[in-house]
Image: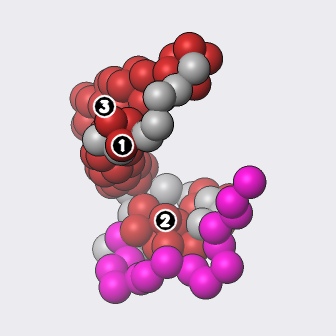
Amino acid sequence: MSNQPTVREILQRIGAELAAQAGTAEGLGDLIPFLPALDAPLQARAQSIDALVQHLEELSLLLERLAPLAGNDPAPPEILDAVRLGDLSARLGGRRGVGVDSGALDLF
């Protein structure tokens, strides 16, 4: 039995990651009432958080439905090497106990 995750498992894990990110984005919407009065363009951008959440949730559900169709063949080992965030790559590969990479976050 291969230690390499299957395509199905990776798709399921991507779906779970999208769902988790949707939850994070939804939490950002809770901050909007605490912001000072925003002009119309900023209000529209703030309201786009809801659209982002909806898109992430739908993508997650799509992957959940698609994953069983992928079969149980192992994914190519190099497929997760392209993921630039080490902790994300580890989670998608099924490795547990991996924290956030130091210096892996780019802000602005």
**Label annotation for residue 57:** 3
Task: Specify the amino acid type for callout 2.
Answer: Leu
Residue at image mark 1: 34
Residue 19 x/y as whole percent: 30, 43
The residue lying toward the viewer, choosing from 49 and 37, is 37
**Does the magenta portion include 101?**
yes
Residue 36 x/y as whole percent: 46, 37
Residues rendered magenta in the picture: 94-108
Is residue 84 among the parts visible in the rendering? yes
- Check if mark 3's residue and mark 1's residue have beta carbons within 8 Å: no
Distance from label 3 to label 1 (Cα)?
25 Å
Residue at 64% in and 67% down: 105
Given the current orientation, which residue lies at the most extreme front position?
37
Residue 78 x/y as whole percent: 64, 64
Given the current orientation, which residue lies at the most extreme right position?
108
* Quarter in which the C terminus is drawn: bottom right
Categorize mark 1 by other alpha carbons within 10 Å: few (<14), some (14-19), many (20+).
few
| Between marks 2 and 3 in the image, the one whose residue lies nearer the viewer | 3
Does residue 78 appear left or right of residue 20 in this picture? right
The residue lying toward the viewer, choosing from 20 and 40, is 40
Residue at 42% in and 62% down: 92
Looking at the rendered structure, the secondary structure element under dot 2 is helix
Does residue 84 appear left or right of residue 87 in this picture? right
Residue at image mark 2: 88
Comes first in the chain, label 2 or label 3:
3
Q: Quadrant of residue 84?
A: bottom right
The colouring scheme, among rainbow, by chain, secondary structure or one colour, is secondary structure
| Between marks 3 and 1 in the image, the one whose residue lies nearer the viewer | 1
Distance from label 2 to label 1 (Cα)?
31 Å
Comes first in the chain, label 3 or label 1:
1
Residue 106 x/y as whole percent: 70, 63
| Between marks 2 and 1 in the image, the one whose residue lies nearer the viewer | 1
